[in-house]
Image (cartoon, helix red, strand yellow):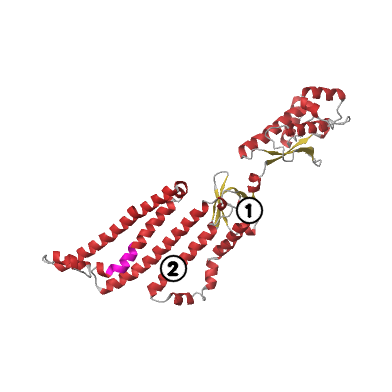
Amino acid sequence: MKFDHLHDVVQPWLKELPQGTVISALFTNGVAVVGLLFLYWVIRRLVLPNVENLARHISPRKIGHLAPQLSKFSGRFAFVLCLLVFSAYHERLFVAPAWVFIVMETLVYVMLVVASGFLFSSLVNLGNGVYNLFPFAKEVPIQGIIQVIKLLIFIVCSILVVSILVDKSPTYILSGFGAIAAVIILVFKDTILGLVASIQIAANRLVTTGDWIQVDAFGADGEVIDLGLNTVRVRNWDNTVTTIPTYMLISDSFKNWRAMQESAGRRIKRAIHIDFTSIEPLAEQKRALLTEQYPLLEKLDDVPSDITNLGLFRRYAEAYLKQHDAINQDCLCMVRELAPTQHGLPLEFYCFSRDKRWVFYEHLQADILDYMLSVMPAFGLRPYQSVSDYFGAHRVKVRAVSKPDAIVE
C-alpha cells in the first residue's frame, strides 16, 4: 500500500485518542525530526568515518595530517545532505499550515546556502592541506590565495541569501553593486592590497612560513608563523608576536635570513680595537720566544723580517681560524685591519661558522674573541679601552684627598 505522507501512516494508530488529529500531527513532526537527526548521525558517525578510515589505511602518514580538515568537512557534508533531504521531502514528512511551510522553505534555503558555503570552505581547506604535503609548498605558499577563494565563496553566499530573503534574482542584487563600488573598494582596501601582495610574494618567493625575517619598521625579528591575506604574523625571539600588514612586505623593505640558513655557513664579523701605543716593531728574540710558545707560528711562510707585533698577531689569528674545526674553510676566512679611528685600530675577524644554529654561533664567536683577547698580551698588544668621565673625575678626587695639604671643593 502506497502512502503520500508520513501522517497517513501515523494517523490510523492515534485517531481513536482524544484530540487524535492534533496528537498525530505532533507525533508525525516528532518522528520526522528524529528521522532527520538519525540520518545525520548515520552519515556523520558511521558512513563518513569508514570512508576516512579507508583513506587513512591507504596512506596513513599523509591522511593523518588531514584529520582535522576531514572531520570538519564530513560534519558539514552530513548537515548539507540532511538539509537537502528536508528540502525535498518536508511536505511529505511534516504537518503544518501553508504559511509555515513557506517560512520553513525560506529558512531552509538560507541555511542550505550558508551550509554549502561552509562546505566549500572546508573543501578549499582540505585542498590546501593536500597542497601543503608537497615538498614545494613551503617555497610557494598559497595561504593568501586560499583566503581570497574563501572570501569569494562567502560573497556569493551573501548575495544568494539576500536574493532569497527579498525574493529577487541574484542579478537584481548585483545590479546595485555598481553604485556602491567605491564604498566596497574603501572597505576592502587592505584585502585588495593584501591579495596583490600575496600574489607577488608567492610568485617571487620573497617569504614563506618558517622564514626568519627582520622588519625594523615594526620591530619584528623572528620566525614567520602565518602568512595570510591581510596580515603576516611573526613570532619574535622573545616569544612575542608581531602582526604586519601583508602589503607592507612589498611596499617597504625587510631582511630575510633564509639565504643565510641555506648557505654553507653563518658569517662571523667582529673587531677588536688595538691601542696605537702598543704597536711596535718585533725584536728577533721576542719573535723566537713567541714561535716557541705558539707552534702555529712555525707554519707561517710569508712573514717579513721587519714585521710588527700586530702583523705577527694578525697572521697568527688568521692561521688559528683556518685550522679551527668549527669554521667552514670553504668560505672566506681572513683577519684584516680597518681604517684607524679615535678608538684605536680595528682588527676584524671575518669567517663563517659551520653550524648556523643561533646558540652555537654566539658561543663560537665569543670563544674566538675570548681567546684572541687572552693571547694579545703575549704579543705586547693592548685592546683600546676608554675610561668614563665619572671614573676619571673620581681618581682625581681621590688623589686630591690623599694629599694632606690639598683643598677639595
Question: In the displayed structure, does residue 346 sit left or right of residue 194?
Answer: right
Within 10 Å of disc 1 (Cα), the crowding (few <14, some 14-19, many 20+) is few
Query: Circle 2 — which element?
Result: helix
Task: Check disc 1 and report the residue beneath it.
Answer: 217
- Asked where in the image residue 398 lies, by quadrant, the reply is top right
Quarter that holds the C terminus: top right
Q: Nearer the viewer, residue 154 or 47?
A: 47
Task: Check disc 2 and report the residue beneath it.
Answer: 158
Residue 342 screen position, x and y as percent: 80, 40
Residue 299 screen position, x and y as percent: 80, 28
Q: What is the C-alpha distance between the residues marked 2 and 1?
A: 38 Å
Query: Circle 1 — which element?
Result: helix
- At horizontal 10% and vertical 66% (from top left) the residue drawn is 16
Q: Give the range drawn in magenta.
A: 82-90
Question: In the displayed structure, does residue 29 sit left or right of residue 161?
Answer: left
Question: Which is more foreground, mark 2 or mark 1?
Answer: 2
The amino acid type of the residue labelled 2 equals Ser
Residue 201 screen position, x and y as percent: 60, 57
Residue 290 lies, with reference to residue 163, above or below; the image says above
Let me know if residue 62 appears in the view: yes
Q: Is residue 77 magenta?
A: no
Query: Residues at badges 2 and 1 in contact (C-beta under 8 Å)?
Result: no
- At horizontal 64% and vertical 38% (from top left) the residue drawn is 355
Residue 118 lies, with reference to residue 66, above or below; the image says below
